[in-house]
Image (cartoon, coloured by chain):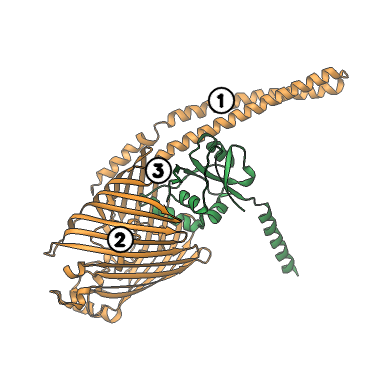
Amino acid sequence: MKTKLLPLAMLAALPSLGFAESGSIIERLNRLELQGKEDALIISELNKKIDQLRSSKIRVVNVDSVNADELQVQELKSRIDSMEVRNKRQVSAIKRKLNSNSDRLQIKGFASVYGTKASLEGVTLDAGVDNNWRFSPDTVAGLQFNYKLQDDIDAVFQITAKGGNGFDMEAEWAFLRFRVNDNLSVRGGRMRLPWYMYSESIEVGYAYPWVRPPVEVYITSFTTYEGVDATYQTSIGDWNTSTQMYYGTANTDVASSDAVTGLAFNVDKDDLTLRASYHYLKSLSINGFNIEDDVTYYSLSGRYDNGKVFAYAEATNSDIGKKLPFIGNYAANITLGYQFEKFMPYVGLSKAYSGAKHEETAFSPLQKISLESYTLGLRYNLSSQVSLKAEVASYDNFDGTLGNSVLGGEPSLNSSLVQDLNDEGVDLFSIGFDAVF
Amino acid sequence: MKKFVATIVTVLAAFTALQSQAGVVVVVNSSVELNVSKADVAALFLGKKKSVAGISLVPIDQEEGAAPRDKFYQKVVNKTPAQLNAYWARIIFTGKGQPPKAAFDDAEVIEMLEKDSGMIAYIDSASVTGAVKVLLTVD
């Protein structure tokens, strides 16, 4: 799926999908235009006739003749009216026809462009963040095609290009969905794993307040899987619920699992959303580590957003930290924001550590994880499609560990760097914008 | 004094604007027998629900800038434009759904409802005709 040919093939196939009927619409528009010209001629002639009748009326004394003229004027007027109504209806019908075509195929896109810099010299974090302003780590663009094959079946295909990944095009979503009924839909293909609240939309910066969702929470072994899922939506009183179950396999250059399966449960009412999820990875193996083990993840999260106050909290727990080095297994974030007109300042607090840190394991202290972070940021909604953000995230309290592996990047065993990290912590500065289109 | 007059003028202008702003009504085809709550309508327009009381309903939105749109989302769905945009960004790009189809104006909404009893929409209360049934009124 990583091949660059597939997206291109999809693009090549597009013209034949959505626009097959546009020819007939152009014909109809042409006919309507001709008809409009004819109508305009007729209307101007009719108006002339009306004027003539009206002006002649002044000179004519015969009352019967005046009445007859008035009748004729009325008749001409109603002819003009009915012509106008007919034309309006035809225009409206054509608009709707155009609409129904664009309904079949929807193309939408998103992009984020950020400059990011780390405060500490010599450190390299996820996606190549270092001591220089770099524009690739947090920059991403995506294009999504939705094609409705029939009322209850649609196909979704999304390609993204991430700066942190050399802008290689990847299909993050490529699935067929069947809507069984008003409550149940099933999908098959490649999909994003519904790890946490924002995992499925992690690249769509416009959808959340931060420059990136809290890395301590959102670091996972995989982002996508190939398989099937079923989502059941129903309401209990005023609460909307959504239950999503999935099963498949996951495979990347760095990790693989024979089977990934799990469940995500979501309830919301008015401004409040609550979520719980469970995930199970069968014989997870990560390159470079001679380990193959089953791993479980749990998460609990909530979001309150009434348009003014934004509050989010998420906590995750996994047994992966006991089985693999350099990975934390407890992580949590709480973020609060307040919307002042178009500005939203927000503040976040994260904590992550590996339980193994406090237990007897084969890992050295360096291979364990501990860190805390504070995030302070400002979001500005420039328009309904663009938001600007500036953010400082400060990572600290590494507690003698290599916390920077939570921040991604290669775990470095350079002891002076570890010393610096533990003494000073590391700050990440980011500024840029998100767009949806 | 000037400031005072300016304030009065602004307040009066705002007041007149409020006065002239008609209510928004949630409507369906006149043949539909149904009771809905605000929460039902909000869930339908956010794609969280596809039916109410066993009746499948397709929401019909109005284009951005259409007169009753802002009031509908503010009073019925309880979402600011910013919230709504972030919400649909999340839904669209996770492949979970698409925002409702949008009509050009109240007249087109009524025309669509007349032909299809499986739709639900909102219009300005002044635009109501015999072809539609009002389910909810918001002032």
Which chain is depicted green?
Answer: B
**Foreground pick, A3 / A82:** A82
Label 2 or label 3, whichever lies nearer to me, is 2
Residue depicted at x 41% and y 64%? A303
**Foreground pick, B49 / B46:** B49
**Foreground pick, A160 / B74:** B74
Q: Residues within 10 Å of mark 1 (few under 14, many from 20)?
A: few
Task: Give the side of residue A56 with respect to residue A348, left or right.
Answer: right
Tell me what hue chain A is rendered in.
orange
Task: Give the side of residue A33 with respect to residue A416, left or right.
Answer: right
| Residue marked by disc 3 | A106
Residue A18: percent from the left, percent from the top?
Answer: 39, 36
Q: Residue A219: tell me if it is visible.
A: no
| Residue marked by disc 2 | A277
- Type of the residue with mark 1: Leu
Q: In terms of sequence position, does the residue under pointer 2 or pointer 3 come before the other?
A: 3
Q: In terms of sequence position, does the residue under pointer 2 or pointer 1 come before the other?
A: 1
Label number found at residue A34: 1
Label number found at residue A408: none
Q: Residue B54: tell me if it is visible.
A: yes
Chain letter, disc 1 residue = A
As helix, strand or loop, the secondary structure at mark 1 comes to helix
Q: Height in image: A136 above or below B100?
A: below
Label 1 or label 3, whichever lies nearer to me, is 3
